[in-house]
Amino acid sequence: MKKLLAFAVVAGGVFFVIKRNKDAKAEADLWREATAPVDTHVNGASLNGSTPANTGAGQN
């Protein structure tokens, strides 16, 4: 009976450490995403759905 109780305590401790590390990683990922610089243009297109204005440069 004591061995089973000791096993349960060890298993609970391992579970707690794994869960804590997983939660810490998720929190760090959220923080990294929230504080990342915002790129407003991707390949010449704006992220708000509009297209860049045509300046007429280079047209024949």
Image: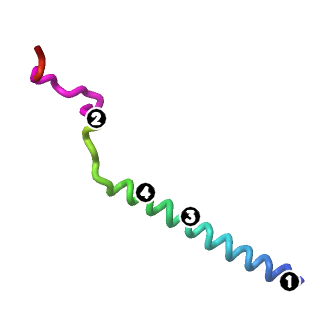
Observer-nearest of 59 and 4: 59
> Which region shows up in magenta?
44-57
Q: Which quadrant would residue 5 be assigned to in this image?
A: bottom right
* 4 or 1: tag closer to the N-terminus: 1
Secondary-structure class at tag 1: helix
User: How far is the residue under mark 4 from the one under mark 1?
Assistant: 41 Å
Q: Main secondary structure of the magenta part?
A: loop
- The mark found on residue 50 in the picture is none
With respect to residue 36, does 24 lie above or below?
below
Left/right placement of residue 31 relative to residue 7 reads left
Residue farthest toward the top in the current orientation of the protein: 60
The mark total stands at: 4
Q: Which residue in the protein does label 2 denote?
A: 43
Q: Which quadrant would residue 20 be assigned to in this image?
A: bottom right
**Where residue 48 sits in the image (x, y, percent)?**
28, 33
CB under 8 Å between callouts 3 and 1?
A: no
Q: Which residue in the protein does label 3 denote?
A: 22
Left/right placement of residue 39 relative to residue 16 reads left
Q: Which quadrant would residue 56 be assigned to in this image?
A: top left
Foreground mark, 3 or 2, reads 2
Q: Which amino acid does label 1 sit on?
A: Lys
Q: Which amino acid does label 3 sit on?
A: Lys
With respect to residue 58, does 9 lie above or below?
below
The residue depicted at 46 percent of the width and 62 percent of the height is 27
